[in-house]
Image: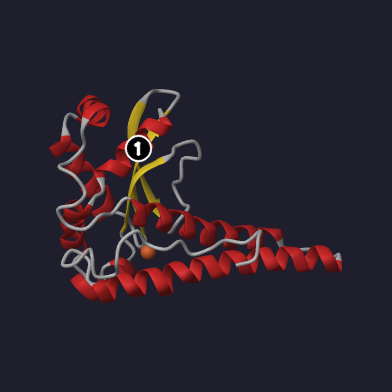
Amino acid sequence: MEIGFYELPPLKYQYNALAPNISEEQLRVHHTKHHQAYVDNANNALKKWDAARKDGTDLDLKSFLKDYAFNLGGHILHTAFWENLAPPGKGGDGPQGALADAIAKDFGGIDRFKKMFSQAAISTEGSGWAVLTFSKQTGRLGLMQLEKHHVNLVPDSPILLVLDVWEHAYYIDYKNLRAKFVEAFWGIVDWGTVSERFEKAR
Ligand code: FE
């Protein structure tokens, strides 16, 4: 990959490692086709930018920036998503330490957090994401319910935990049953990654 462009990050586990919660076929298609397409499209946008600069021509900035935000958002969210997953039984027994305390303070405990995050994921209109975030200004954990990759985004909130609920994330394994996929997600969360992100954010 040329310097100055985005790259598809390799996964930290094998394609079959998240089964049965996410099958090998589902993960492979999601990573190598869907995520790759966002990377390619974000890079195509940069190439268009470079070409327009060289020619001295104007970009249609409204359409360019909309397209760029969508594809780059897709790339960043997928990267965060792969990192906060771990093979079943390998991701730790739920949040520990400071993260567990913050979840208790701001959500009323792990069960209520899971319920609220799940509801945010299941009720996302169309294609989108549920995100656990942290606000430095208030010292509170919070949720985002992103539509597509960038609608309803709170610009100052780092991602601690994210779940992809686009149909492309689960259709091979769960058909239209998004709630079943959300339930399976809790079995493959890498809580260590979530804790590390929380430590960095606060
Ligand atoms: Fe996806």
Please provide percent x and percent y for residue 128.
Answer: 37, 57
Q: Determine whether the beta carbon of the residue marked 1 sits less than 8 angstroms from the nearest atom of ligand 1.
A: no
Type of the residue with mark 1? Glu
Quarter of the image that includes the C terminus: top left
Quarter of the image that includes the N terminus: bottom right
Please provide percent x and percent y for residue 127.
Answer: 36, 62
Please provide percent x and percent y for residue 189.
Answer: 23, 50
Is residue 175 visible in the rendered image? The answer is no
In the figure, is residue 41 to the left or right of 150?
Answer: right
- For label 1, the crowd category at 10 Å Cα-Cα, with few meaning under 14, some 14 to 19 and many 20 or more, is few
Residue at 46% across / 61% down in the picture? 9
Residue at 21% across / 49% down in the picture? 91
Query: Residue at label 1?
Result: 196
In the figure, is residue 164 to the left or right of 5?
Answer: left
Q: Would you identify the image quadrant in which residue 58 lies?
A: bottom right
Residue at 33% across / 70% down in the picture? 168
In the figure, is residue 172 to the left or right of 10?
Answer: left
Q: Quadrant of ligand 1?
A: bottom left
Residue at 44% across / 47% down in the picture? 152
